[in-house]
Every structure is written in C-alpha cells, then in structure tokens.
Image (cartoon, grey):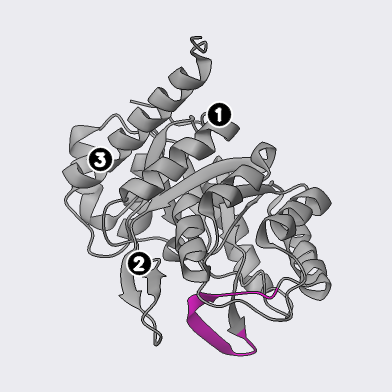
Amino acid sequence: MAGAGTTIPSRAGVGLKACHYHDILGDKPDIGWFEVHAENFMGAGGPPHAYLSTIRASYPLSLHGVGLSIGGIEDLDLDHLDRLKALVDRYQPALFSEHLAWSSHRTAFFNDLLAVPYTDETLDLVCAHVDQVQSHLNCKMLLENPATYVVFETSTYDEVDYLSEIARRTGCGLLLDVNNVYVSCINHGRDAADYIDRFPAAAVGEIHLAGHGEDRDDEGERLLIDSHDRPVIDPVWELYGRTLARTGAQPTLIEWDNNIPEWSELFAQAHLANSVMTRTLQNCRSPHVA
C-alpha cells in the first residue's frame, strides 16, 4: 500500500466515491492514490471529512476542482478560492487541478464545463486567473484540456498551442485527459494521435482516463459525450500508451463519476492502467532489433 505523502506516485489512482469507503478502509487496496472533487468537501465537517481524513492518512491525495470557472470573463470568486485554500491547507494534496472551461456568469452557475474560444483576449484572461489561483493557494496547479462539442469561428489558436502558451506564461502544469482528446477529436473530425504527438509533454503532471457515451448529431455524424459512466475503450488505451511513450510514467486517474461500479471493477481499471504503463515503458527501453 502506498503511504500518505506530499507526492503522488507515477501509477494509477481512482476517484474516491462514498460508496467505496468501506471497501477501501476494510481491504486497504494496493492503489496508488485517490482524487476527489474539491467542491464535494467544502463543508466544515461531517462524515465526508471523517472518511477522507482516514483515507488521506494512508494514501496520497489529489484535489480536482470543477467550479472555479477559470475560462470565464468575470473575476474569480474569492470566497470559493478561500474554501479551496482551506482544503489545501487541511489535506496537503500532492496535486491540485482545474478545467480550461467556464461554468458561471454573474449569479448563474451551470452544471456544465463550457468551452472557451481560443483567442488572445481569452488567453490573457485565463493566464491571469491561473496566476491568481496559484498565488492564492501557494501551489502550482494543473490545467485540464476540455472535452468539447463545438468549435468557435473566432478562435485564432489551436487547442494544443493555446494550452502550451498558458503553461509557458504562468508556469502551471497540464492535466492531459486522454479521453477528452479522443472525444473532442472524433467530434470535430481531427486526428487524436497528432494531438498527442504535439502536446507539450514536459508540462504534463497528471493523466486522466475515462469512458464515454456515443450518440449521433442532427446530421447523423458520431457525437461522443464525456460521460464518465463506463470502462475505458481500446482506442483510448492505445492513445494512453502513445502518450506515455512521450511523457514517461505519470500519475494516472481512472475517472468514473456516473453509474459507479462495484469497487472491484474500478480497481481492475486501475490495474489495467498500471499494466499499460509498465508495458509501454518496457517497450520504450527495449533496444530495436535489426
């Protein structure tokens, strides 16, 4: 079992769900780490904090934010930042991450992570927000590439170039969600392998893997939905191996937020991620045979 600490090992972890608390505390599984959505633990106390504190004593932890609206045009919510700071101080997570997206406008809050047009204007705003978060929390953050369903005619940056520039300007790291890459590239008719090959590998501090749903749009074309409600599919595993060949071993999260399975199935997905990581790195180290 991994010991608790201020670093996360380069192996698979899973999202911590309440329905698995007793399995985890009873079995003490050999899992690399756990990740939680920060907004689920912004209350002062109660059973969620009691369980999280106990699990945090034995495993490394990552905090993943979903509510900062970093891509929004308005100022960040200082009360929200203060609550995040309290969580960071309390649990000392090894990683904190958020999304390249917006989810609020004035007093309205949306239950979605909405796309950002990639322009010089939004780049300046996002960089300012990332700088503010890192300064307020006194830690380096990771910014996650989004799953998108629309593209903006006003965009003047490719997504990889946009994320690269944010990392360069702010010094933040990047959370590479491989499933999001696959979903977005299928939705927009782009090459997922090319996206991975151009991504700034040195900035990657964490990888996400997840399952997704599939539908058809009004023209009958494939439309993938980042649903986090089923196992990772083979093409995403293949992209994951391609990613690791560039980045080396990385902390890798299995995200499964809806239709949550039994602990054994979630644990098996983490085990598979570790197997892909081991096999990929062994292949990268093996000499080529003429």
Q: CA distance from mark 1 to mark 3?
A: 22 Å
Above or below for 104 versus 223: below
Residue 26 x %, y %: 18, 37
Above or below for 99 versus 174: below
Q: Dots 2 and 1: beta carbons under 8 Å? A: no
Q: Quadrant of residue 154?
A: bottom right
Q: Secondary structure at mark 3?
A: helix
Going by the picture, which residue comes out furthest to the bottom? 107
| Identity, as a three-letter code, of the amino acid under mark 2 | Ser
Tag 1 residue: 248
Residue 160 x %, y %: 67, 55
Q: CA distance from mark 2 to mark 1?
A: 27 Å
Tag 2 residue: 227
The disc, 2 or 3, on the residue closer to the chain's N-terminal end is 2
| Identity, as a three-letter code, of the amino acid under mark 1 | Gly
Q: Is residue 135 visible?
A: no
Q: Which mark is residue 83?
A: none
Tag 3 residue: 267
Q: Secondary structure at mark 1?
A: loop
Which of the two residues, 238 or 13, is positioned nearer the viewer here?
Answer: 238
Q: Residue at the spot x=40%, y=85% of the render?
A: 219
Structural crowding at the residue carrying mark 1, measured as other residues with C-alpha within 10 Å and reported as few (<14), some (14–19) or many (≥20): some
Predominant secondary structure in magenta?
A: strand
Q: Residue at the spot x=45%, y=41% of the render?
A: 240
Q: Is residue 110 magenta?
A: yes
The stretch of residues the image draws in magenta is: 105-117
Going by the picture, which residue comes out furthest to the front? 290
Count of all numbered marks drawn on residues in the image: 3
